[in-house]
Image (cartoon, grey):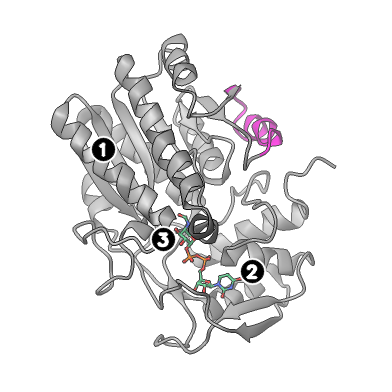
Amino acid sequence: MVTGGLGYIGSHTCVALASQGYRVVILDNLNNSHRAVLDRLERITGQSFQFVEGDVLDQALVASLLEEFDITAVIHFAGLKAVGESVANPLKYYRCNVEGSLSVLRAMQTGKCRTFVFSSSATVYGEPAENPMRETFPFNPQNPYGDTKAAVEVALKRLIEADPEWNIAALRYFNPVGAHESGLIGEDPQGIPNNLMPYVAQVAVGRRDELAVFGDDYPTRDGTGIRDYIHVMDLAEGHVAALEYLTTEGGYLPVNLGTGQGVSVLEMVTAFEQASGQTIPYRVAPRRPGDIAQYWSDASLAAKTIGWRAIRSVDDMCRDTWRWQSSNPQGFKEP
Ligand code: WQD
């Protein structure tokens, strides 16, 4: 079962699962995703997906689906992920992300499925004392969104201590970007994109006039923020690798999913211009509150444990994003 399976990372993970022969049940409340994605998934994979419209907070619904479809594992994406919104509305984030995750876990506990892959985030680390970030770094989230990911991870560790029957991986994403190579699915944020890549893509396709670069006075090689961007299909394949790891290894595995490389804002803009052939006008704007100068992952634990590493380049990320955005200028909106 993939909760949030019609969302950005969830939908790409469904493609990766289907390509490895998994039968997938998608639970999604369509709050931040589009029903049209289901047809795109079937076009890409040639497979049908069982789709249930519903909310992970409905524990009885989750329990009934686990039993009805004899679910062997749950990959839990369903949740809210806008940092700025979480600062403005923390209770909404605690309810959706923490209570939602606990609802799924309680539903699983009433049944027999004990394999759980959790969509976590590098924001659990907060401002790093140093780079690259390792899984042994302490939790130090700096916003309610990061709080929710750390809170669920703490609960998962306690759950394993109480009942070693559970097999759990907490995947800490760095910065997911890109789109499936078909151009049929990709990132389609509601409203004005918070994140760099969808904003750049919307400038390139003419939906936005220019990019605001949030600060060029950071202590980095070109003054702009540095992040560890990872192609969403690498991320998706990381979930399948984690699932396969959990079929033989039990316990609790927190693991970074990143490339181990940092890329600056201006480097990403240049890469996107080269990949798309479009000019990305930008202006330097004040720093965004809460942003940190630079962070990137130590990705070695994923290679050692789940036998996975990112293989797609920054150019792949930009070319695939451009193919998606240029063939879907308005995203998934029904025409
Ligand atoms: C990247 C860089 C900005 C937009 C967030 C969440 C994280 C994860 C990914 C959920 C920064 C700069 C951005 C713009 C810009 N989400 N920027 N102009 O903030 O690293 O991470 O999204 O898991 O949890 O914290 O990603 O893409 O917003 O910013 O200059 O219009 O681009 O300052 O340096 P971020 P981002």
Q: Is residue 236 magenta?
A: no
Q: Which residue is mark 3?
A: 143
Task: Tell me where residue 194 sits by quadrant.
Answer: bottom right
**Mark 2: which amino acid?**
Ala
Q: Which mark is residue 156?
A: 1
Residue 250 shows in this picture: no
Q: In the displayed image of the protein, which residue is found farthest to the right?
A: 335
Q: Is mark 3 within 8 Å of ligand 1?
A: yes
Above or below residue 328? Residue 47 is above
In the image, 252 versus 260, the foreground residue is 252
Please report whichever mark, 3 or 1, sits nearer to the chain's N-terminal start: 3
Q: Is residue 132 left or right of residue 181?
A: left
The quadrant of the image that shows the C terminus is top right
Give the extent of the magenta segment. 34-51
Dot 1: element: helix
The residue at the point 64 percent across, 69 percent down is 275
Please report whichever mark, 3 or 2, sits nearer to the chain's N-terminal start: 3
Q: Which residue is mark 2?
A: 275
The residue at the point 66 percent across, 36 percent down is 37
Please report whichever mark, 2 or 1, sits nearer to the chain's N-terminal start: 1
Question: How far separated are the C-alphas under marks 2 and 1?
Answer: 41 Å
Q: Is residue 244 left or right of residue 223?
A: left
**Whole-percent x, y for residue 228 in the image:** 41, 66
Residue 9 shows in this picture: yes
The residue at the point 71 percent across, 35 percent down is 36
Q: Which mark is residue 93?
A: none
The quadrant of the image that shows the N terminus is top left
Above or below residue 234? Residue 18 is above
